[in-house]
Image (cartoon, rainbow, N blue to C red):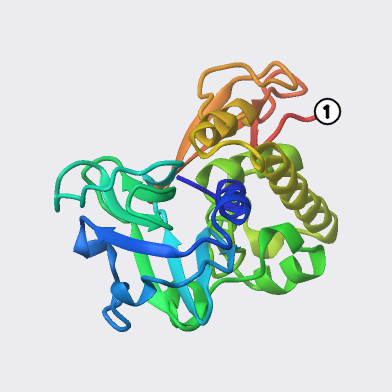
Amino acid sequence: MPELPEVEALAHHLREHAVGSTVFRLDVASLSVLKTAVPPYTELHGREITDATRHGKHLDVVLGDLHLVVHLARAGWLRWSDALSPAPLKPGKGPISLRVHLESASGPGFDLTEAGTKKGLAVWIVADPSEVASVARLGPDALAIDASQLRELFRGKGTRLKWALTDQSLIAGIGNAYSDEIMHRAKLSPYATVGKLDEGALEVLAEAIRAVETDAVSRSVGQKAARLKGEKRSGLRVHARTGLPCLVRFAGILFGRFRSRTSRFSIVRPARPGGSRWLIGGCLGC
């Protein structure tokens, strides 16, 4: 699933390659991805792309007073081309849901694609991003979160940490993979109750959120879109490494499930024979 760093990198790529270009044509192969009917998608024809930005995990392509807002969901992606095929897309054929031609039918542009049979890719054309319900309810952005904000967001909540980190109404931008990386860095259990975290834990957690996301953004921005998925995998220390040793300290990485989400975490061996084992995001002493 594309998360904050990958979406930020895609926005950066569009700022570098698409801003200043005029939309020649939109091809829609899957009408189900369009979540708005007014204005029609043809309203974007002839408009100049003036910016590309991000709201949590939503990509926002700005075209003057209109916004093409995209949520890539679990298996969506943006694929850039310096020379698109001028042939119109065939509805229901292949992974391409929407194509944006820039300058001419055979000029540069990008495809919005989605793999698999479970579809979640969504596109809105709106005058204001806040018209998109999932944007309007976003919490503070993960790149700028601090301990005082976490204290207010978590106050009185009995939510497990894993679930809270991936709740976009609490913190915008964190998904399944980077939540594991954050807990590993902060050495906090995915099962921890957020309303019971003390001041020290909140400080450590806030620092871990900013550090993990900032590092991932720095590794992702400037990469070609086709390489972003590989770059994400190469930087992960715990997620998708079930059964492998922790890269920081030798301990097994375990797998857990939280409703519809999964989590990977290290196990700390007891300090004395017969002692309890603590499942935490990272290893003691890391």
Can you give x and y, in whole percent of width and height, for residue 53 in the image? 60, 63
- What crowding class fits label 1: few (fewer than 14 Cα within 10 Å), some (14-19), or many (20 or more)? few
For residue 181, which quarter of the picture? top right
**One can see residue 237 in this view:** no
Is 49 or 271 nearer to us in this picture?
Answer: 49
Is 78 or 196 nearer to us in this picture?
Answer: 78
Residue 227 vs residue 200: left or right?
A: left
Mark 1 sits on what residue? 285
Can you give x and y, in whole percent of width and height, for residue 100 in the image? 37, 57
For residue 217, which quarter of the picture? top right
For residue 121, which quarter of the picture? bottom left
What's the amino acid at mark 1? Gly
Determine whether 18 is above or below 66 in the image. Answer: above
Quadrant showing the C terminus:
top right
Q: Residue at x 14, y 53 (%)?
A: 91
Is 122 or 150 nearer to us in this picture?
Answer: 122
Residue 155 vs residue 206: left or right?
A: left
Can you give x and y, in whole percent of width and height, for residue 199 in the image? 83, 61
Can you give x and y, in whole percent of width and height, for residue 6 in the image? 56, 46
Quadrant showing the N terminus:
top left
Q: Residue at x 58, y 57 (%)?
A: 173
Is disc 1 placed on a helix, strand or loop?
loop
Q: Residue at x 29, y 43 (%)?
A: 85
